[in-house]
Amino acid sequence: MDNATEVFQPLQADDPPVVAGYRLAARLGAGGMGRVYLSHTQGGRPVAIKVVRPELADDPDFRRRFSREIKAARRVRGAYTAELIDADADGVPPWLATVYVPGPSLAEAVARRGPLPVPAVLWLMAGVAEALQAIHGAGIVHRDLKPSNVLLAADGPRVIDFGISLASDITSNTATGSAIGTPQFMAPEQATAGEVTSATDVFALGQTAAFAALGGPLYGDGPAATVLYRIVHSEPDLSPLPEQIRPLIARCLAADPAERATLAEVVEWCRQRLGPDADAGAGPAVWREIAGAEATIPAPVPDPTPVPDPTPALDPTPVHTLPLIAPPQVTVAERPRTRRRRVALITVAAVTAGALLLAGLIWTAVEGADRLLHQDTATSSTPDTTASARSSASSSSSASAAGSESTSGTGGGAPETSSPSSTAATTPLPEAFSGVMLTKKNSVSIKEPPERDNRKGDIRFVCEYVGCSLESDTSVISLLYSKPGATLDSCRFALTGAKDHDLPLAAVAAGSEICVKDPSGNIALFVVQVKSTALWDTPGISFLTADMTVWRAA
C-alpha cells in the first residue's frame, strides 16, 4: 500500500475503544458480519478484531452456531490461513480475533493494478486451495470465499473469515429471505438454497481466480437476482480468460458439484504449470511485486495513564499515637542560634493562640449576654408567644451562636451565617419509565416524557438504507462503553463536551446504555432492552425498546 491511511482508518465516534481487553488502534474495514479493527496482543503482535453486528448478535440461533464455528475454526492450522487466536461468542457483542495479515486484499490489488499475470493467478489458486484443504479438514465450509476475503501477504495469499459464514446463515435466511454469500461468487446450489458442501468452495475458488485474471466478476455486475440467474441458468463465457488457465477454471465451475476438480487436483495442476518456479519457491517474489510496499502498522494503544491525586497522601499512622506538639529535634551539629529562633517562634505562637482564645471567650460572653437581653425583651413584649415559637427562636439563636464561635475560632472578622440549602450540592431525584418504545412513527421527549404518538418529540428512531440510528434536533447523544450500571455522574461525564445529535445503532445491543441531554439541562439514561433493525425497510418490524431514567435540571 502507498501509505497507512489507505489501510488504517481512525476510529469513529460509534467505534468502541476497547473490545474484551483489546485496545483498538484503527479501523480496518466493515462487512456483512460486522466491523474489523486493528489491535495488539499483550506481547505486541498485531491482530484483527472482528465485532459482530448487533442485528446478528440478537439472534440466539446465531450465537449457538457462532460458538460452534469458533470451536471448529480454532482447529484450522494452515500456511495460507489467518489463524483464529481468540474469540467470545457470548460477548456483548460477539467478537473474534485473528492474526493480522499485512497486505491488501485481492479485490484491492486488482482495483489498483488491474488483472494479475498468469503466474500470479496460478500461485493464487494453489495457495487458496491449500487454505481450503485446511479449512475443510476442520469440518468447515467457507461459504463466502471471494476476492475481499483473500489477503495478499508478501509470502502468499491468506484466506480469512472462515468459520463465521455458516454461523450467519440462519440469520440471513430468516431475516432477508436470501442465501448467505456474495452473489457474484456463489455456486448454483448455493444460489438456489441447495446443499452446500466443500465443492461449493471450489466453485467460488474458480470465480475468484477468474476475477484475478479478468479484473472483474466472471458473471458480470448488476442486481443480485440477475447475477444469480446467470450463475444458475447459463454457462460462463471463458473466452476472455488467458488460455493457460481456462481448463482448470472450467473444471472448478462445473454446474454439477460432483464434476468439479478436487482441491488436491487444483494444487497439482498449478504446480505442473509453474514448473521449476514451484520447486524453487518463487512465489514470494511474485507477491512482493503485486502487494507492493507494506504500510506501517500503528503502534499498540497504551493503557490510560492514571491521573495522580493532587491530595497529599495521609500518614497511615493512627492520629492518637502522635503527640499534640512534636518536640523539636535538634541535632548535635545544630547551632544555638537556630534553637533560640525556634524557641522564639514557639513563644510567639503560644501568645497568639492565647490571645485568640481570650478574644473568643469575650466574644462568646458578650454574644450570650446580648441574646439573653434580647430574649427577655422579646418575651416581655410578646407574652402570648407559644412554646413552639420560643423553641424555634432558641434553636435559631443557638445556630447563630455556633456559627459565631466557628468564625471567631478561625480568627477572622465579624460572625456570618449561611443557609445549608444554599451551599449543599443537590442531586435531582430520578424518574423511571420502563419499556419506552421508539418506532419510525413516534418519538420521545425528555422534558415531557415518555412517548409521543407523533414525530414532534426531541428523540426519534430513524432507519435508512445505511442503517438505523437515534436522532435529535437539539439534544446531544452519547453511547457508553463502560461496564453496565451507569449513573447520573456517568452520564454527566460522557456528555461533557458532547456535540453529536445522532447515534448510529450498529454498535448498540441489548444492555447498551445511552446518555442524552436536552437544552434545558435534563439528562436521560436509556438502557436498551430490545433492538430490531435487521428488517429496517419492513413496516412495523424495526423498533427499539429501552428503560428510561430522567434527572431534571441535572
Image (cartoon, grey):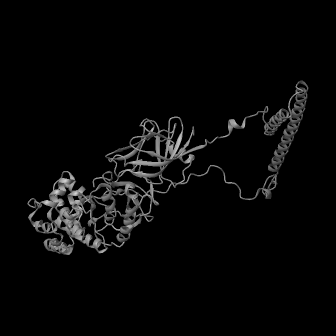
For the residue pair 158 and 419, the one nearer the viewer reads as: 419
Q: Please state which of residues 376 and 101 is positioned toward the viewer in this rendering.
A: 376
**Image coordinates for residue 348, horizontal then vertical, percent:** 84, 42
Residue 156 screen position, x and y as percent: 25, 66
Figure check: 191 above or below 420: below
Q: Is residue 297 above or below residue 361?
A: below
Q: Tell me the quadrant of the picture where the N terminus can be found.
A: bottom left
Quadrant of the image occupied by residue 199: bottom left
Spot occupied by residue 397 in the image (x, y as percentages of width and height)? 83, 34
Q: Quadrant of residue 70?
A: bottom left
Can residue 489 be seen here? The reply is: yes
Image point 38% across, 48% down: which residue? 542
Residue at the farthest top position? 381
Residue at image coords 48%, 38%: 445
Question: Image height check: is 217 above or below 413?
Answer: below
> Depth check: 115 or 438 in front?
438
User: Relative to 431, is 546 on the left or the right?
Assistant: left
In which quadrant will I find the C terminus?
top right
**Nearer to the camera, 1 or 545:** 545
Asked if residue 421 is positioned above or below residue 145 in the image, the reply reads above
Residue 448 position, x and y percent, is 52, 37
